[in-house]
Amino acid sequence: MDAQSLKKLREWFKKNSAELPWRPIDLDAPRDPYAVWISETMLQQTQVSTVRDYFTRWMKRFPDIETLAKASEEEVFKYWQGLGYYSRARNILKTANVVRNSTRKATLPDNHKELEALPGIGAYTAGAILSLAYHQREAILDGNLVRIFSRLYALDFLPTESKVALKIYWDYAREIADSSKAYMHNEALMELGRTVCKVKNPDCANCPLHSSCRAALEKRATEFPPSKKHTQKDWHGTVLVIESADHKILAVHGGQKFFKNQFTLPHFESPRSATAGLPSQAERYVDADMVQSVENIGKFRHSITVHKMECDVLYIRLSGKAPAPTSSEIKWVRRGQALDFFASNFCLKALSFLKKN
């Protein structure tokens, strides 16, 4: 991209940049590396409109790495609830502890090698931190930039197709970043992809790069980048809401199809025509002799990555008090605290039927 195009891009960004809680009013100002890290991690697979409020709440509760590192995983999940991909939240907490315990006094590193050694920080996030926070000449490559580069240069392939394809995209990203204004070029392109060079209905007439975009000039913008086919996986399952006589709900950790590394309601794959009564899978968690009643109380739909899920909610009432946990993988949560304890919308959807009963 030539100097004139980059100048147009900067001018467009200064005039059209949205007000965001993680973006300073002065676009040339260096940023807090911690805030960049949190915002960019939240923005992975999540729309800006959704992240706004989550980021504000997060920064109010965890204003710095030191505060975050002292939090429990359960509390971190609570503030992440609704963003999905909970491994991101878990890695954020792990990294906070690693950084706090290092000699850096709870400050993120300022180089690629050390950043990418931290849990959950890959090439993109590291580049964003180095570029936006430290104003280094570092390239970034996210979905917005992939789409823009594909259209600018009429690239009819995706960076995921081969090492050569990936190198071509990164070379274009590094070209953009080879400037003292790399931080502005990077963020301007992300903004351009979000608001103008959109996946559907790109607004080519109002794009500052229109005159140098091959796809736009050929009126073929919607043909780029080539579509990536996703294989949808339908999954039908049963979610167990097991309540003891002293009003405690069973939570399990591990051994589940989804949410393997956090406490969740027990769930398992099941046929749509499941038979009535206590399923054999439930006997992993409760003694059948303690079961007072079994009732199907609802059904809900949910999506996790490519999984399109339909779940039956089975409410199992026990005749006695919650038994003592046999391992750290089992916990009984007071019913009144369940909505705060379970971090995922998957569990909250199942528990919403319980409130009706």
Image (cartoon, rainbow, N blue to C red):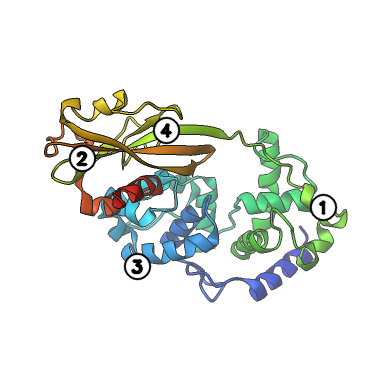
| Residue drawn where x is 44% and y is 27% of the image | 273
Q: Are marks 3 and 4 in contact (CB under 8 Å)?
A: no
| Residue drawn where x is 34% and y is 67% of the image | 60
Q: Is residue 172 left or right of residue 348?
A: right
The residue singled out by tag 1 in the image is 215
Q: Which mark is residue 168?
A: none
State the separation of the CA atoms marked 2 and 1: 56 Å
Quadrant (top left, top right, bottom left, bottom right) of the N terminus: bottom right
The answer to whether 59 is drawn above or below residue 150 in the figure is below
State the separation of the CA atoms marked 2 and 4: 22 Å
Numbered disc 1: secondary structure: helix
Asked whether the viewer can see residue 149, the reply is yes
The residue singled out by tag 3 in the image is 60
Question: Callout 3, which amino acid?
Answer: Lys
Q: Which one is in front in this view, the residue at disc 1 or the one at disc 4?
A: 4
x and y, in percent, of residue 327 in the image: 18, 32
The residue singled out by tag 2 in the image is 331
Question: Callout 4, which amino acid?
Answer: Gly
Give the quadrant of residue 241.
Answer: top left
The residue carrying pointer 1 sits among few (fewer than 14), some (14 to 19) or many (20 or more) residues within 10 Å by Cα, namely many
